[in-house]
Image (tube, grey):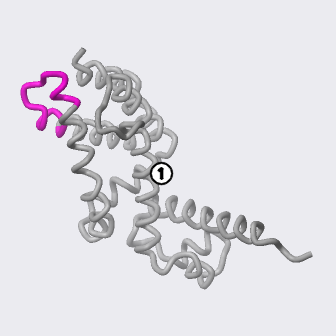
Amino acid sequence: MPRTKNQYKEIRESKKTLILDTALELFANQGYYTTSISKIALKAGISKGLMYNYFESKEELIKEIVYKGIDELLTNFDPNKDGILTNEEFEFFVHENFRVLKQNIHYWKLYFATVMQPPVHKLIQEKLMELLPGLLKTLVTYFKQKNVANPEAEALLFGALMDGISLNYIIDPENFPLEVIKSMIIDKFSHR
């Protein structure tokens, strides 16, 4: 019996997910430059030619992986998308940020490795530059409501600390006290 359109669509999505997951693992563990399309295809158990039916290039593949991870994280930032963070929304974001970090450590290894390599960073820079001003504006508004002396600096400090904490956790997830640090971040930046 021939397959239906929905079956073909499911098969296509399944293969695409397999490719993305395999590429993510290889990029995170072996590096972007040393991971070839051939290595990804071999590990995924598909032909190199089939890879190109899903992604035109390795650059397109890394972009999709990084964009997908950023989008996942940002769904937890200002959940109602009104540009104003409440205390509950701020705390929710911190909790969810670290939950996502723990849940997908391979992605975050790749993310930090990517942003540290200028040629690779250029591939994702456009999306980051599109998102950062809005995030920063929302954080600055949040800290202004808290009567922080320098809300712009506070927002940048918060972002830098979140990045640094994430990086330290990735380096040593077994020994890094993420839950304790998470509570400290909430206490410091909630300004209750």
Residue under label 1: 106
Whole-percent x and y of residue 41?
59, 75
Q: In which quarter of the image is residue 82?
A: top left
| 45, above or below 154, in the image | below
Q: Is residue 118 left or right of residue 124?
A: left
Residue placed most toward the observer, 155 or 185: 155
Residue placed most toward the observer, 98 or 125: 125
Which span of residues is magenta-colored? 142-156
Of all residues, the one furthest to the left in this rendering is 149
Whole-percent x and y of residue 56?
49, 80
- What residue is rendered at 36% in x and 37% in y? 78
- What residue is rendered at 31% in x and 31% in y? 85
Q: Is the magenta stretch mostly helix, strand or loop?
A: helix
Q: Is residue 126 left or right of residue 89?
A: left
Residue 50 in sight: yes
Confirm whether the magenta stretch covers residue 151: yes
